[in-house]
Image: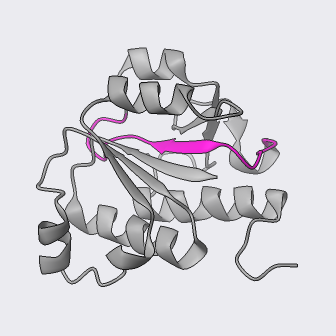
Amino acid sequence: MRLALYQPDIPQNTGTILRLAACLGVPVDLIGPAGFDFSDRSFRRAGLDYLDHVELVRHESFETFEQARALRTPPARLVLLTTHAETAHFEFGFSDGDVLLLGRESAGVPAAVHDVADARVRIPVRAGLRSLNIAVAAAMVLGEALRQTGGFPGRQ
């Protein structure tokens, strides 16, 4: 299981997601360009002392991310978290090798990325409300995915 962040805009959300990933032992792919400097120095300046505890891979673009994903054996399934999905996250059957892709806070992902996704899931929210904070959404969906696959740290 992996998390992937598509061109993140807000460093605080990215930091929260990296901390989540470090605590749960889930690798993260950062797909650029980002709306901020996502160098190690920048994260350390923001006080992210968890950076040493997360497997972090930076990709210059979605294309380089896709090239790396294609090399995984077995190929990793790309699961997009989006408000435009029909399937609720708790109704979806997650697999160990899934990559959970989160879009930009300001704009999600473009149609071309939607088209590449192997699956799309959403978190149901009350009518009239748009969406949850991206870090909260990441925690909810990752939690469900790890519950289904038995991937929580220390679980026998």
What is the basis of the colouring in this image?
A: one colour
Image coordinates of residue 51 in percent, x first then y, are 33, 74
Which quadrant would the C terminus be assigned to in this image? bottom right
Question: Can residue 97 be seen at all in this image of the molecule?
Answer: yes
Image coordinates of residue 60 in percent, x first then y, are 24, 35
Compared to residue 57, the image places residue 63 above or below, namely: above
Magenta range: 92-108
Image coordinates of residue 89 in percent, x first then y, are 70, 47
Q: Is 56 or 142 nearer to us in this picture? A: 56
Horizontal side of residue 18 vs 12, given as left or right: right
Compared to residue 104, the image places residue 119 above or below, namely: above
Horizontal side of residue 9 vs 28, given as left or right: left
The verdict on residue 138 being magenta is no
Question: Can residue 129 be seen at all in this image of the molecule?
Answer: no
Horizontal side of residue 91 vs 125, given as left or right: right
Which residue is located at x 81 percent, y 44 percent? 91
Image coordinates of residue 19 in percent, x first then y, are 42, 75
Which residue is located at x 22 percent, y 57 percent? 10
Give the residue furthest to the right: 156
Which residue is located at x 40 percent, y 32 percent? 65
Query: What number of labels is visible?
Result: 0
Type of secondary structure dominating the magenta stretch:
loop
